[in-house]
Amino acid sequence: MSKANIKVGIGGWTYEPWRDNFYPKGLAHAKELNYASRKVSAIEINGTYYSTFKPETFRKWHDDTPDDFIFSMKASRFATNRKLLSGAGDSIKRFIDSGVAELGDKLGPIVWQFMPTKQFDAEDFEAFLALLPKKEGSRALRHVMDVRHESFIVPAYKALAKKYKVSTVFTDADKFPSFEEPEGDIAYARLMMADAKLKLGYAPKALDTWAERAQGWATSPKKRDVFVYFINGAKEKAPAAAGALLERLGWTAPAT
């Protein structure tokens, strides 16, 4: 698989410690997405987890980024932070109908993040998966489950994920359980162990290893798209870590 099918990025683009650091001194806040999207190849949108955005906002994000850029996004917390997931239909529809398709070809995976206290209930979780739309208009949707309770690390969950063709977040975080390797038709990694004492957040050898792993995920057990996001830990290091990983993968930044 082409290295173009491995996307590497950061969570969001509005973060105070990145100003006069990752972002050039004096850069207008309104130009931060334009700048960031030319330093990484993907961004995971966090704001959609907390708030509802309008179609024109998604359209603006589309127009402000390079042609081959990808946005992943967190789905609304109102769909996932509930006792019974089977009742999430209205919240799912409201999120999908908010205008996400305005991102066009730049619309990447949708991440459904669950609370760390949310335990696996096979019947209820299958009811939730059955509610997830496969398309929005003519555009295919790809769904990723960010499950954060150890009860999900069982064959029964894996079987449901396979049945409904959803992927599962892989993380290096000690505080959240994770399968040993990414599960699903796409590999989706959220890396959370950046160290503030390290220039790049991760040691050079660790980044070498992540580059090798990402390339392996892209071809094994089958060809698939790969997404690697540096999310938190020492978040101020995330852009540097993402850039260093992209460099190891031979990525060429688009023209500014």
Image (cartoon, helix red, strand yellow):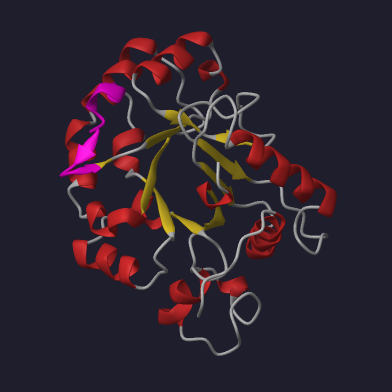
| Left or right of residue 212, residue 54 in this image | left
Q: Residue furthest front?
A: 2
Indicate the position of residue 166 as horizontal and vertical percent values: 39, 28
Q: Residue at x 60, y 88 (%)?
A: 25
Q: From what the image shows, is residue 152 above or below residue 108?
A: above
Q: Position of residue 115 (x, y in %)?
A: 46, 34
Q: How far across and how far down the image is residue 43, in percent? A: 48, 58
Task: Look at the picture and state if 154 lies above or below 103.
Answer: above
Q: Is residue 100 magenta?
A: no
Nearer to me, 241 or 53: 241
Rendered-image quadrant of the N terminus: top right
Q: Is residue 253 left or right of residue 76?
A: right
Q: Quadrant of residue 239?
A: bottom right
Q: Is residue 70 visible?
A: yes
Q: Nearer the viewer, residue 207 or 154?
A: 207
Magenta span of residues: 128-139
**In the foreground, 169 or 227:** 227
User: Is residue 172 in sight in this rendering?
Assistant: no
Vertical relation: 158 (above or below) 13: above
Q: Residue furthest bottom?
A: 26
* Residue 250 placement, left or right of 160: right
Question: In terms of image quadrants, where is residue 176?
Answer: top right
